[in-house]
Amino acid sequence: MADNTKTAEYTQALHDLITANHILHYHNVLDAYGHVSVRHPEDPDIYVMSGDRAPALVSSFVDLIEYHVSDSSPVDPKAKKGYQERFIHSEIYKRFPEINSVIHSHSDAVLPYTVTGVRMQPVFHIASFLGTNVPVWDIVQHYRENDRQDMLVNNERFGFGLSSAFSASDSSKLVQSVVLMTNHGFTAVGNGIRQAVYRAVYTHNNADVQTKSIMLRSAQMSIQPDQPPTPLKYLNEKQTIGGQAMNDSSQDRPWGLWVKEVEASPLYVSHEM
């Protein structure tokens, strides 16, 4: 990133972006892969994300790259190598002006729900933002004859296809906060970094709890085959709507904890230069 004079608001956004990379790694949402971005708080036509490196190792402003929302081209033509899948971010920002942060993850807890046909559903109130119908988007339907089918969302066409899964009937009205991606992972969005990180962490956690619940019920059925199966209880629509308000009003609490966790670990380094 060019070393230009930055306002206090922009500087804070960049610090939070570096911290978000560390938090998401600490909580196993990102590993060597995956990425998080933030829209420029003073120029909505620009977004920022790390260059091509592991999220845990992002440590300073020089690791970050500014991109144009319009086509994901770098603001600085001499910028270092970036992530191939930055089009996930630009196409979401382009379609939804209210979204200011995007996270893409290959969470191993979530991946089974992208390949088995088992629907991810919210099992506790902290994950109310998932709603009652988490969509699964498949890039295969967007491939053309000569496309390399490597599952990467590495152009505007694929990014546009993914962004449409967050809306209803190809509109620009946001109706989903999380979209699963077949054989790939998931993407979460938020009105800011803290909301997006909250949603990504608890999408990962919800998947883990849901899988354990399914396994526990299956074990119970094998031990007590004569007993009628107990249905799993997921949140209903009213509960998810009510819970979302709680999610949004309390997201600063986990953020404060998560910041302290990564500050206490010598792996994560954060400084401006």
Image (cartoon, grey):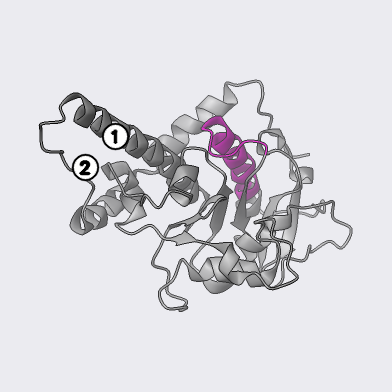
Q: Is residue 236 above or below residue 255?
A: below
Structural crowding at the residue carrying mark 1, measured as other residues with C-alpha within 10 Å and reported as few (<14), some (14–19) or many (≥20): some
Is 25 included in the stretch rendered in magenta? yes
Main SS of the magenta part reads helix
Is 134 included in the stretch rendered in magenta? no
- Which residue appears at 54% of the width and 60% of the height? 100
What x and y, as percent, mark residue 96?
51, 70
The residue that mark 2 highlights is 232
The residue that mark 1 highlights is 213
Q: Which residues are magenta?
A: 12-32
Q: Residue furthest front?
A: 226
Of residues 20 and 204, the one nearer the viewer is: 204
Q: Is residue 91 visible?
A: no
- Local SS, label 1: helix
- Which residue appears at 42% of the width and 74% of the height? 173
Residue type at mark 1 is: Ser
Left or right: residue 206 compared with residue 139: left
Q: Is residue 246 above or below residue 162?
A: above
Q: Residue furthest left?
A: 227
Left or right: residue 80 compared with residue 28: right
Of residues 137 and 197, the one nearer the viewer is: 137
In which quadrant will I find the C terminus?
top right
Of residues 263 and 119, the one nearer the viewer is: 119
Q: CA distance from mark 1 to mark 2?
A: 8 Å
- Do tag 1 and tag 2 residues touch (Cβ < 8 Å)? yes
Residue type at mark 2 is: Leu
Q: Is residue 203 visible?
A: yes
Of residues 136 and 240, the one nearer the viewer is: 136
Q: Is residue 191 above or below residue 146?
A: above
What x and y, as percent, mark residue 247?
33, 47
What x and y, as percent, mark residue 262?
57, 28
